Image (cartoon, rainbow, N blue to C red):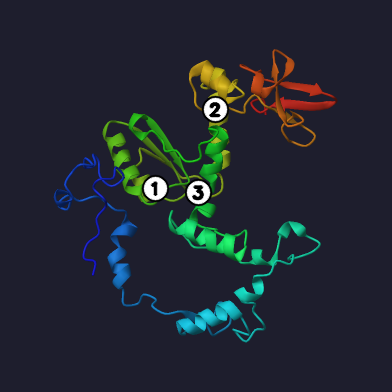
Amino acid sequence: MAVKIDGNPYHPNTREPHLPYDTDPGDATRVNGTVCGKGGATIQTMYNPHRLQHPLKRVGSRGSGKWKTITWDQAYDEIINGGDLFGEGQVDGLKAIRNFDPIDPNAPELGPKANQLVFMPGRIEHGRKEFTDRWMNDSFGTINKRMDHTSICEVSHHVGLSLCIPGKTHIKPDIMNAEYIIFFGTTPYEANFPMQALARKLNFFRERGGTLVMVDPRFSNSAAKAARWIPILPGTDAAFALGMMRWLMEHDRVDLKYLACPNPKAAQEAAGHLTWSDAALLVREDNRKLHRDGEQLLVMVDGTLSPAEQAKQADLLVDTVIDGVRVQSVYKL
């Protein structure tokens, strides 16, 4: 029986400074590491008398909230073989879905019927995800092998980072060396990862005089700890960010040298930056897409069209006509 849950004191996420790795485990048992609120509630979850211990099957209409307890054998049988499970008509089971005929011959991009199995495991970590991928994808044959927490929640920052830093999809802010931090769409004192490490570093940041700004419609616990809370209307994050960008440009508070670097090598050589900007890339007025020569992105350098990957410093204020089509730089837009 579990009686207490602590974080690993050897790990920097749970303790700062963390224990040296050569610390005797016997000594480590007397040192507490932190865990997040969900981790701390694990014991209550494990031994809650109202926790689910058997499969439940819906017995009322969808949304009625009516369920009954069934055996594991019945659950396995119905999941595999299907049937008229709810008195609403035939429901295919896994046996019927594992079929490699096309879902729709007129829409071959949908793939085989096996793709109709979608596995949604919630938060699943390494070790388990590789195991289930082998079963869902390699064995059953569905391309929808795993729609997990990362597929839903984290994808935005993975995509954003990959666009800024090629080859990197998961980095953390340098809180300890920052002076001014703005959080959009996240509440670091309630739900982020690693939650306790991030919250702890933010406390250190605030103690040494750093300014924390929270942009959030809701007055959260994080907003309560911020130097400034900006209660925007829900869904207006992008408009607010664009307004900030416009103010920076109109008040000459932007690094034009950095913005004019249209590729990673140029940004690295110009100012030692690991990221680069798309500010100099050209946008076509006719389709609102980036102007290209085949697959090659284009910029203007001293008024002359040039491949973006070859330019060191590109023109930022571009508004011209190329082959009868008006184009403007991203920065000009």
Relative to residue 2, is residue 307 drawn left or right?
A: right
Q: Amino acid at mark 3?
A: Glu
3D distance between C-alphas at marks 1 and 3: 11 Å
* Pointer 2 residue: 247
Badge 2 density bin: few <14, some 14–19, many ≥20, Cα 10 Å: few
The residue lying toward the viewer, choosing from 79 and 256, is 79
- Asked if disc 1 and disc 3 are in contact, CB closer than 8 Å, the reply is no
Instruction: State the residue at coordinates (50%, 36%).
Output: 168
The residue lying toward the viewer, choosing from 261 and 128, is 128
Q: Position of residue 195 (x, y in %)?
A: 35, 48
Q: Amino acid at mark 1?
A: Phe
Q: Residue 193: which disc?
A: 1
Q: Position of residue 3 (x, y in %)?
A: 21, 65
Instruction: State the residue at coordinates (35%, 37%).
Output: 227
Instruction: State the quadrant of the N terminus.
Output: bottom left
Furthest-bottom residue in this view: 87
* Pointer 3 residue: 154
Local SS, label 1: loop
Q: Earlier in the sequence, mark 2 or mark 3?
A: 3
